[in-house]
Image: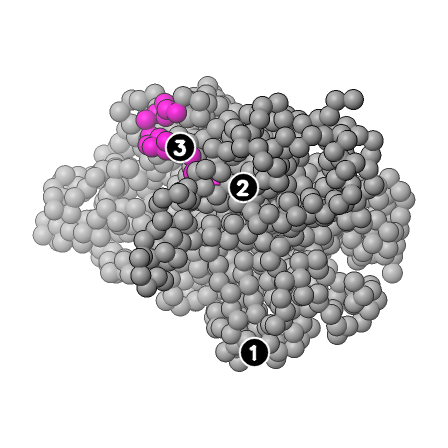
């Protein structure tokens, strides 16, 4: 069990187990306490315990208290929702639960639904439909919400080709960032020769500011397992792996619980649902290398080797884990599959744009009021996301840019707010969809400093196998640091662009190939800021210290 | 075995299925620069020097590892490829402290030769001048990290040919280092058989025999495998 | 025919490149027909003159003195040649770069000294923190690597730069080391 075990588990692992309160009779009102990582760190544990006590003290014998996954509005945690009325209590303090308890004392299904916050009203939830509604540690909750019906239907009514056809018809594309058609990926694995096949769930989410996959795993782990089982059925795999980073202890713990429950309930293991389909899932824990999110590096890591990428082709679909055809999909991609099989590919394809179907989960972060997890149809505008759902920029400051796609992506200026968010539009604008991190930057952000941050991130995370990435990210970081410290000449900028082009073309894997993207996109839209740093030795946003008087000679251009 | 026909720099050529672009090019007398590649060892496509343009692919492909395909259009030289390959060589030089004039491999170094072949006569990138160690704890050999290009030939020959797997890579990014036995000093390595294959395949003066002075490192390229005789590398 | 104005400069190097220049032997006489050596460690001129056509610069830029000299040379020269590995890459002088100037001087003149310890400050110019290739400090037109560049190569390069009909192509291409 290489990769399993306690290694890498942070000391602060929140494993004080909180019992749900389930009344013996019919339930009038349910307090759903968000116990995903963000709310837990804000004190959701105390809230849960306090509510259980408070309900008892008040003698509310028809009130339930249960843990749920991410309620989405992370900015306002700890969050408690009353499920029967959809009323959301924000910033709940374990020390004073009066308002929640008062609500619970009277709320029932007949008292009418609360006016939904625009944060929720404007979302379309497919992947996140169960988030904040079911207990992520209860398979019964998942089944009660329609869980595993897609797998059961597939195993009893559909042959593998029909499952593949539905996924192909759905137009689903890889949610890890590159947007490769999922149906085509699966079909490649079906057509490739091999005795064994594997399904891998890539949960090595590593972009700064991204927490979609973590939230889904912490909130609805069975959904990911069901998606994996469906993929395995479609391509003929008997074995699956979830590769999840060690920095996600809660996700890992809930995932392991879900695997145990699913095995016991017969949704994983031999002859699932009395069919001849067998599928098991093993968890592998990453050791903190960003590059292991790259599929060939991830596979090398599962194989027990050093997590470094290999040139593609061959793609994993043809020759992946142990040389066998391997389907490797991101958490969100797999989590969309049960809904697609349950409702049909055409249903899924009816949402979204011509080339980008369905919905996308975003982690809203940065200088936006409602930081949190959202799901919107493909093609939703940035304005709708930032202002409609996100509630606008903190302190109503002017928006300067929206960063998407993490270290592989770019910064889109305010002039692009009305751009629809889909794979093609984002690429055309110089960024990428990425895995779904969306960081809002206001007028106090220095775009050169943002580019420097991402380049340093790539330098730290480069595996060192190929020279363009290993040396390119290091040299580019030095150049960017010279610019942000006020010691650069115009030659630094020319060198930076030349290096960026070389790295983009020559690097072995996506990490190095896309590492210059934040530089290119900020140069495209904010070249003036670079000029100000270099020619006027000032940082317009006032972020950079600009302390450099004379340049370090070794980096000074002639 | 099926055969693929394709074009190499506009010339029609044929290659067996499974052959790489580099193999067919070498057979055709078309020279493509290489560094991490060595006949007889597995290919890793890491040094990026052998990249060629393949029509329809968004970026250059490493010839050492890309199999030939029917109808492929391969271009081995272009202004852009020349420039990028030269930049790779430049990056290798500035990354560590390659000071040819006082190197044991001066005059018998593949990095030095690549600079000549690719017209690299100075470096636009600033030298990074890291402070690196030399491990001379082994009785016969030494490793000078100042001159290592991380081609991993030593790692592969030790694993794939000698079967000892003494060498591997530690750390990541710019801090990556070739290490013996998880960082044990080479001289204390319980797995090293002192066969010297790593020294013989090292393209630079990073791995060398003790007792050799500047320019005396010319490697004997002992034909410990048929591939060295076949390609005449033993006679350089 | 007017002779071109040729100069050579010696910064932080071992003078081996100049020795290789002298290895032109009788070809120096031929060269003298085309060029006048207006400044060089080999001739007794104290001040670098203006209007130099070609200058061979040997050595890295290692001190504040080197820095001032190369800047004034650059200002008075049309074609600047980085002459040899020390000028092109900083070569042997750059061996100290991973350490830095202050720790280096401390070790050499204080830690390892029994008497009169102290970093010399009189007569000798202060070291830059790093030894630099010439083109890190001023623009350079021609790079002539080698430690030293062979005489044949120097001959061929000089004839070309002086606009004289091609000399004998060098046996060995320019190479580091």
Mark 1 and mark 3: Cα distance apart in space: 48 Å
User: Does dot 2 land on a helix, a strand or a loop?
Assistant: loop
Q: Residue at x 54, y 41 (%)?
A: C11
Residue with the most extreme front position: C44
Q: Residues within 10 Å of mark 3 (few under 14, many from 20)?
A: few
Tag shown at residue C11? 2
Q: Residues within 10 Å of mark 2 (few under 14, many from 20)?
A: many
Residue, disc 1: B139
| Mark 2 or 3, closer to the camera | 2
Up-down: is B135 above or below A155? below
For the question of whether residue B77 can be seen, the reply is no
Can you give x and y, in whole percent of width and height, for residue A130 in the image? Answer: 39, 45
Q: Secondary structure at mark 3?
A: loop
Whether residue C31 is situated above or below residue A150 in the rendered picture: above
Mark 1 secondary-structure assignment: loop
Mark 3 lies on residue: A550
The CA span between labels 2 and 3 is 23 Å
């Amino acid at each position: 069990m290489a990769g399993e075990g306690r290694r890498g588990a942070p000391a602060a692992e929140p494993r004080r187990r909180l019992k749900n309160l389930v009344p013996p009779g019919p339930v009038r009102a349910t307090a759903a306490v968000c116990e995903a990582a963000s709310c837990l760190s804000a004190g959701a544990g105390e809230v849960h315990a306090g509510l259980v006590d408070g309900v008892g003290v008040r003698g509310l014998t028809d009130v339930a208290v249960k843990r749920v996954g991410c309620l989405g509005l992370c900015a306002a945690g700890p969050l408690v929702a009353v499920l029967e009325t959809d009323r959301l209590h924000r910033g709940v303090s374990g020390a004073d639960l009066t308002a929640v308890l008062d609500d619970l004392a009277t709320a029932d299904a007949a008292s009418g639904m609360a006016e939904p916050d625009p944060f929720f009203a404007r979302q379309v939830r497919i992947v996140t439909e169960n988030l904040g509604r079911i207990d992520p540690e209860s398979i019964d909750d998942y089944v009660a919400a329609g869980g595993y019906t897609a797998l059961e239907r597939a195993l009893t009514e559909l042959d593998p080709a029909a499952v593949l056809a539905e996924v192909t018809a759905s137009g689903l594309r890889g949610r890890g960032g590159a947007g490769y058609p999922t149906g085509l990926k699966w079909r490649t694995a079906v057509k490739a020769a091999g005795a064994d096949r594997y399904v891998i769930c890539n949960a090595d989410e590593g972009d700064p500011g991204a927490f979609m996959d973590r939230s889904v795993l912490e909130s609805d782990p069975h959904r990911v397992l069901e998606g994996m089982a469906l993929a395995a059925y479609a391509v003929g795999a008997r074995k699956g792996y979830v590769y999840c980073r060690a920095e996600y202890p809660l996700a890992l713990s809930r995932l392991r619980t879900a695997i145990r429950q699913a095995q016991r309930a017969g949704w994983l293991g031999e002859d699932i649902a009395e069919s001849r389909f067998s599928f098991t899932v093993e968890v592998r824990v990453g050791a903190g290398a960003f590059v292991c999110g790259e599929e060939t590096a991830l596979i090398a890591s599962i194989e027990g080797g050093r997590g470094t990428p290999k040139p593609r082709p061959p793609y994993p679909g043809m020759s992946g884990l142990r040389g066998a055809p391997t389907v490797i999909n991101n958490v969100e991609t797999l989590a969309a599959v049960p809904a697609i099989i349950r409702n049909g590919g055409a249903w899924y394809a009816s949402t979204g744009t011509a080339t980008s179907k369905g919905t996308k989960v975003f982690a809203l972060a940065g200088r936006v009021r409602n930081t949190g997890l959202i799901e919107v149809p493909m093609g939703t505008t940035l304005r709708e996301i930032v202002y409609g759902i996100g509630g606008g920029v903190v302190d109503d400051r002017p928006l300067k840019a929206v960063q998407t796609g993490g270290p592989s992506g770019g910064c889109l200026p305010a002039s692009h707010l009305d751009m629809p968010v889909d794979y093609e539009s984002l690429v055309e604008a110089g960024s990428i969809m990425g895995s779904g991190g969306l960081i809002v930057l206001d007028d106090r952000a220095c775009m050169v400093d943002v580019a420097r941050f991402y380049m340093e991130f790539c330098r730290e995370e480069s595996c060192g196998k190929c020279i363009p990435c290993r040396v390119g990210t290091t040299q580019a970081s030095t150049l960017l640091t010279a610019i942000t410290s006020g010691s650069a000449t115009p030659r630094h900028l020319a060198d930076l662009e030349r290096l960026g082009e070389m790295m983009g073309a020559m690097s072995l894997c996506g990490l190095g190939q896309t590492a210059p993207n934040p530089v290119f996109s900020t140069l495209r839209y904010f070249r003036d800021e670079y000029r100000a740093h270099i020619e006027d030795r000032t940082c317009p946003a006032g972020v950079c210290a600009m302390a450099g008087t004379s340049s370090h000679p070794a980096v000074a251009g002639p | 075995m099926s055969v693929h026909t394709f074009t190499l720099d506009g010339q029609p050529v044929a290659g067996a299925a499974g052959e790489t672009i580099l193999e067919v090019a070498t057979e055709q007398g078309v020279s493509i620069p290489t560094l991490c590649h060595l006949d007889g060892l597995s290919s890793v496509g890491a040094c990026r020097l052998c990249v060629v343009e393949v029509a329809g692919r968004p970026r250059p492909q490493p010839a050492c590892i890309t199999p030939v395909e029917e109808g492929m259009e391969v271009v081995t030289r272009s202004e852009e490829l020349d420039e990028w390959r030269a930049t790779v060589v430049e990056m290798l030089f500035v990354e560590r402290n390659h000071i040819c004039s006082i190197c044991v491999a001066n005059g018998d170094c593949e990095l030095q030769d690549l600079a000549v072949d690719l017209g690299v006569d100075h470096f636009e990138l600033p030298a990074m001048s890291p402070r690196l160690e030399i491990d001379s704890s082994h009785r016969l050999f030494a490793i000078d990290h100042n001159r290592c290009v991380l081609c991993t030939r030593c790692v592969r020959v030790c694993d794939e040919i000698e079967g000892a797997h003494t060498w591997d890579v530690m750390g990541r990014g710019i801090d990556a280092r070739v290490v013996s036995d998880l960082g044990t000093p080479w001289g204390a390595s319980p797995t090293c058989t002192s066969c010297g294959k790593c020294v013989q395949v090292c393209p630079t003066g990073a791995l060398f025999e003790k007792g050799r002075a500047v320019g005396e490192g010319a490697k004997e390229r002992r034909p410990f495998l048929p591939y060295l005789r076949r390609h005449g590398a033993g006679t350089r | 025919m007017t002779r071109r104005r040729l100069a050579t400069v010696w910064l932080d190097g071992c003078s081996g490149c100049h020795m290789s220049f002298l290895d032109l032997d009788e070809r120096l006489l031929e060269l003298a027909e085309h060029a006048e050596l207006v400044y060089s460690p080999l001739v007794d001129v104290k001040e670098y003159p203006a209007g130099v056509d070609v200058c061979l610069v040997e050595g890295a830029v290692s001190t504040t003195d080197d820095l001032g000299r190369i800047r004034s040379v650059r200002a008075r020269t049309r074609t600047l040649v980085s002459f040899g590995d020390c000028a092109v890459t900083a070569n042997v002088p750059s061996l100290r770069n991973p350490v830095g100037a202050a720790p280096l001087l401390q070790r050499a003149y204080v830690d390892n000294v029994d008497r009169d310890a102290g970093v010399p400050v009189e007569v000798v110019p202060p070291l830059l923190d790093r030894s630099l290739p010439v083109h890190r400090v001023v623009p350079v037109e021609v790079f002539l690597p080698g430690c030293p560049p062979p005489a044949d190569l120097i001959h061929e390069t000089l004839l070309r730069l002086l606009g004289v009909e091609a000399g004998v192509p060098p046996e060995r291409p320019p190479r580091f080391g």
